Image (cartoon, rainbow, N blue to C red):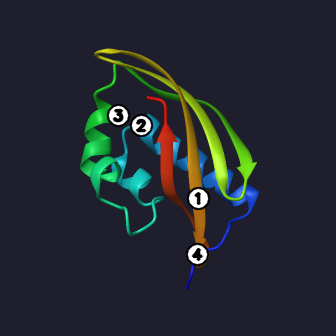
Amino acid sequence: MPASVPTIDASTRTVEKFYIALSIGDGSAAAALVTPAKRGIGPFSEAGMSKFYRSLRDPLALRSVRALGNGKVEARYRYRARTGTCEGTAIVQTEAIGDKTLIRSIRANC
């Protein structure tokens, strides 16, 4: 079934769940919210996400999630790693696949 544009509520919920999973270092839960074609690859690797987010000095704290329309969501967050602090903003593109809303891509400033 081809992907379609998800509802605003579904998009924001998916993005919120993704960043909450990262906040506790759960790469498996975060990866489950990524489109199957990108799961386990590069920055969407379960092990990589778990390792990075569990190693933070201050865990990721989700500040806000805001729908931008057409399946795009802005997420604002903060974390502190060994090398510095990130005051992050990400634009997350979601897509509806069947009855699920999943993350297709993320553009983040850090």
- Residue on which disc 4 sits: 3
Marks 1 and 3, how far apart at CA: 22 Å
Evaluate if marks 1 and 4 touch, with contact meaning CB atoms under 8 Å apart.
Answer: no
Kind of residue at badge 4? Ala
The CA distance from mark 2 to mark 3 is 7 Å
Q: Earlier in the sequence, mark 3 or mark 4?
A: 4
Give the residue type that dot 3 points to: Tyr
Which residue corresponds to mark 2?
24
Q: Report the Cα–Cα distance between label 3 and label 4.
A: 29 Å
Residue at numbered disc 3? 53
Q: Are marks 2 and 3 in contact (CB under 8 Å)?
A: yes
Q: Earlier in the sequence, mark 1 or mark 4?
A: 4
Badge 4 marks a residue whose secondary structure is: loop
Residue at the location (52% across, 57% down)?
103
In the image, residue 39 sits, relative to residue 88, either above or below, namely below
Depth order, front residue of 43/10 = 43
Q: Position of residue 88 (x, y in %)?
A: 52, 27
Which circle's residue, 2 or 3, is located before the other in the chain?
Answer: 2
Q: Compared with residue 41, is residue 6 higher up or lower down, i.e. above or below?
A: below
